[in-house]
Amino acid sequence: MLNRGMTDADKQAIEYCFSNNNLSCIKEIKPQVECIVLYTFISLASVLTVFLNLLVIISISHFKQLHTPTNLLILSLAVADLLVGLIVIPLMGIRYIETCWYFGETFCSLFPFILYTLVSASLGNLVFISIDRYIAVKDPLQYSTRVTTNKAVFCIILNWLCSSIYSIIVLYDAIFRNENPITCYGDCIVTVKFEYVLTDLIVSLVAPCSVIISLYGQIFCVAKYQARLINSVTNASKSEKKAAKTLGIVIAVYLLCWIPYYIVSLFPGYDSNESAVINIMCWIMYMNSCMNPLIYALFYRWFRTSAKYILSLKIFEPSSEYLSLFPEVNDQ
């Protein structure tokens, strides 16, 4: 049916996603050099994202000194980033390069759910991190009683559960009502209603970002006030402020990577599969998952030390979980 009226030369020049299927989509042929460069980039991005976030996960999970409420929230964020590197980056890379979907109709509907859940969970983690840092700087004397490990675990579970439920609600029609009929095999287009896009903009960007920016504004106001009030600041107070500053950089980088995508997605008639602009914005978003561990490496002595222990296999030694990661309080 698709080959009617085509000459032999045309058939040879056209490549299909599935050569043995008459209903296959036509595959866009990219230059070989371009494909090699793109596959190299995708592979490096995926491996680097998984490797760096795995270092964060192993560090916080293994070393007893890192079992704090703040680090548990960082661990949850690292899990979301690792899944982006393990699932999202490779699949979206193959889809972009090959211009075909090779992973089946079922996973075509499931993949947006995974993506939405990871995005929502990441932002939820950042909200809880902001609340944690606000309490630590605002009320340091009561922090240990107000913020506990059990409360952090509860917030993490609640965050992932709410993110999953929210993703199901937003994608319900696309997943369960099959409102995106496949026109040819190798195609995967999941359309979200524009009113859901606006809702997602408010729920997944405007509301949480307003909370985050407001909390960090108050954090730095409090820090500035304390610096004026007290000439000699304690080491503990310095540590809390440094942690707040570092995590503030993480949040700022996150917002810079995600806000452009949401702005572009609101323009009428944009096509996530064909628009070069939206593709660039998407890849900026995905690469954010690789940036957080790099920020930790630059600003956290404990991450650099724990990474050395992991890479040198010292974590397999007896009682390695009790190794000291904070030789000097000021370097925390």
Image (cartoon, rainbow, N blue to C red):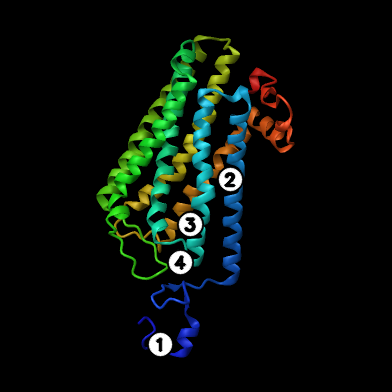
Q: Tag 4 or tag 1, which sits nearer the N-term?
A: 1
The local secondary structure at tag 3 comes to helix
Q: CA distance from mark 1 to mark 2?
A: 46 Å
Name the residue tied to disc 4: 100
Visible residue check, residue 130 = no
Residue 50 marker: 2
State which tag comes first along the sequence, 1 or 2.
1
Name the element at disc 1: loop
Mark 3 Cα within 10 Å, few/some/many (few <14, many 20+)?
Answer: some
Q: What is the three-letter code of the residue carrying label 2?
A: Val
- Ranked by sequence position, the earlier of labels 4 and 3 is 3
**Amino acid bearing label 1:** Met
User: In the rendered image of this protein, does residue 159 appear above or below residue 287?
Assistant: above
Rendered image: mark on residue 92: 3
Q: Quadrant of the C terminus?
A: top right
Q: Which residue is mark 1?
A: 6
Q: Is residue 128 or residue 198 the one in the foreground? A: 128
From what the image shows, is residue 16 above or below residue 328? below
Residue at 61% of width from left, 47% of height from top? 48
Among the two numbered marks 1 and 3 on one chain, the one whose residue lies closer to the N terminus:
1
Dot 4, how many residues are within 10 Å of its Cα: few (below 14), some (14-19), or many (20+)? many
Q: Give the image location of residue 169, x and y in percent.
A: 29, 45
The image quadrant where one finds the N terminus is bottom left
